[in-house]
Structures are given as structure tokens and as C-alpha cells.
Amino acid sequence: MDCRQTKEFMSALIDNEIKDEETKQEVENHIWRCATCRTEFELEKRTKQIIQSKVKLIPVPNDLISSILTQIRLLQNGYASQLTTHSNPRVKPWVETAFALGILAVVLVFAVLFASIYENKMAQKDLVAKEVSGIVNHFDSISKGLIKPQIISDDPNQIKNEIILKADFAPIILEIPGFKIIGASINVPHSNSGDSKCVNLLYRSEDKIICLHQAPLSQTSMHEDVKKRILKGEWIYDFIDDESFVLWGTENLVCCAVSNLSTEELEKVLKQSR
């Protein structure tokens, strides 16, 4: 199940309205794997909790309900003129005004709440994009042939040995199904911070490329909000222009994979890597 399909079931999952257990399991599994969908799920869940805690049900007099329903039926039947002469007592103007204001207040609460959620989501998106923009630009230069890796080899052991000697830290050399490691670059600045001790491993499968960026977490100048998310174990998936990326962390490293694969394809191959 992809992100688009998962979003269609989020509201039903929160309300426990998914009857098919297999579908429910697929939705839950995707949300557990995908940080973007998990964030959206938690926001929607929190939104519903806030609404439920703030909105109170007020008992409505039966006479008022009866009068409103009668007027609606008359309007539907084309007898609006009879509203002023109908035997049922007319709703008092102040009650009509209060009812309208109540509806307006609920609409405004929803509008402000969703605007706040959207603004927070966009702010987080911008923060992550700022952190990875330098890595994406580096990947773009490699994919267009504007720059070449400093180390060119298809031997993972040779690349690892050279990296350890030059970078002073041990990177993760992933085995990505269907992809071969073809090179590496060292000391390419991490994001926009100017940190120097970074490694980029380059993988290729025909015209598909993955650039795996790594840097020591302790030496990375990263925004605290983004760092907190990856320290919690989130894998942050997104894209900039035509490049997909995923940002995550280990106990010692911050990692970012950038690729010309789709976000779903990148997620799939990374989850199968070891």
C-alpha cells in the first residue's frame, strides 16, 4: 500500500471503521514504516481528539427542532410563504441568531485548527528541505555528470578502507538489492552547515542512482527539531523537484539517501537493504 492509498484510510482507521482486517493491517504497517504518513496520521488523530474535547453537545428544545424541520419541509415543497402563517410558533429572532453564531463559531474553530496544522506541517517540511538541499544539489551535479566521485571502484571493501583512512569514521556500507556501489566522495559539506567530515556513497542500477550521505551525528549542525525526529527513529521521506530523499539516523550517524527513484521505490529498496 502506497502513501496515497494509506491517506484514504487514515480517518477510518482513527475512528476504528475499517472492517477488513487485512486492509487495516496494511494501513497500519505503512504508517509504521513511513514517517511522512505517520506524522500526518498523528496530526489528524490529534485534531479529532482536540475537536472532541472542545466541542460540547447542547440539548436542543424539541419545539425548536420541530419548528426548524417544518420550515425546511415547507421550503423544499416550494411553500416558503407559509412560514409566516404556519400554526407552529415561529423561532424567536434571538434563537435564530444564536444558532447561526454557533454554526459560525464551529466553522471558525475548524478553519483555525486546520490552518495551524497545515502551517506546522509546512514549517517542518521547509526545515527538512533546508537540511538536505546541499546533499540534493550534490546528487544533481553527479547525476548530470558535472562532478565525479573522488573514489571510483566497484569493490565495497576498497571503498570502505579508503573512506575510513580519509574520513576518520566508519560509514555504513549498505548492500542495496539490484544496485552496485560504484564510488564515494569525502568531505562534501553536509547540508548548509559547512561540516567537513562527510561521506557520499554512490550506487547505480542502469539509469537509477542512489547517493547515500553520512556524517557523524555529534559533529552535524542540524536544526534541533529535525534532529529530535530522527533520534526518535523516524525515517523522513519527501522530495525536492525530481529527486526523492529519505533522512534518518543511527546512534552515531545522520544518513540521507537521495535518488532519482520515486519516493515509494526508494523506500522499498532501502527497507530491503542490509
Image (cartoon, helix red, strand yellow):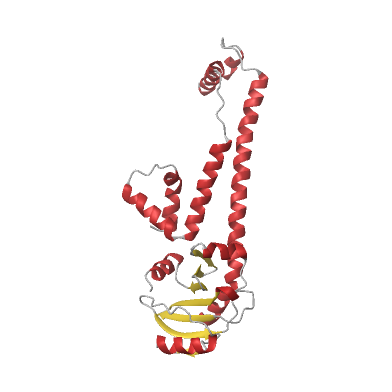
Identify which residue is drawn at 61% across, 82% down: 196
Q: Is residue 192 above or below residue 48?
A: below
Identify which residue is drawn at 59% across, 50% down: 117
Residue 227, x across and y down, in percent:
57, 66
Q: How many marks?
A: 0
Quarter placement of the N terminus: bottom left
Q: Is residue 131 above or below residue 61?
A: below
Q: Which residue ends up furthest to the top in the rendered image? A: 87
Q: Is residue 256 above or below residue 148?
A: above
Q: Is residue 15 above or below residue 188?
A: above
Identify which residue is drawn at 51% across, 23% down: 76
Is residue 26 rendered to the left or right of residue 214? Answer: left
Quarter placement of the C terminus: bottom left
Residue 245, x across and y down, in percent:
50, 69
Identify which residue is drawn at 45% across, 60% down: 34
Q: Quadrant of residue 261?
A: bottom left
Q: Of 162 and 266, which appears nearest the observer?
A: 162
Residue 82, x across and y down, in percent:
57, 15
Is residue 15 rendered to the left or right of residue 79? Answer: left
Q: Of 223 and 107, which appears nearest the observer?
A: 223
Residue 141, x across and y down, in percent:
55, 81
Query: Can residue 173 be seen in this snapshot?
Result: yes
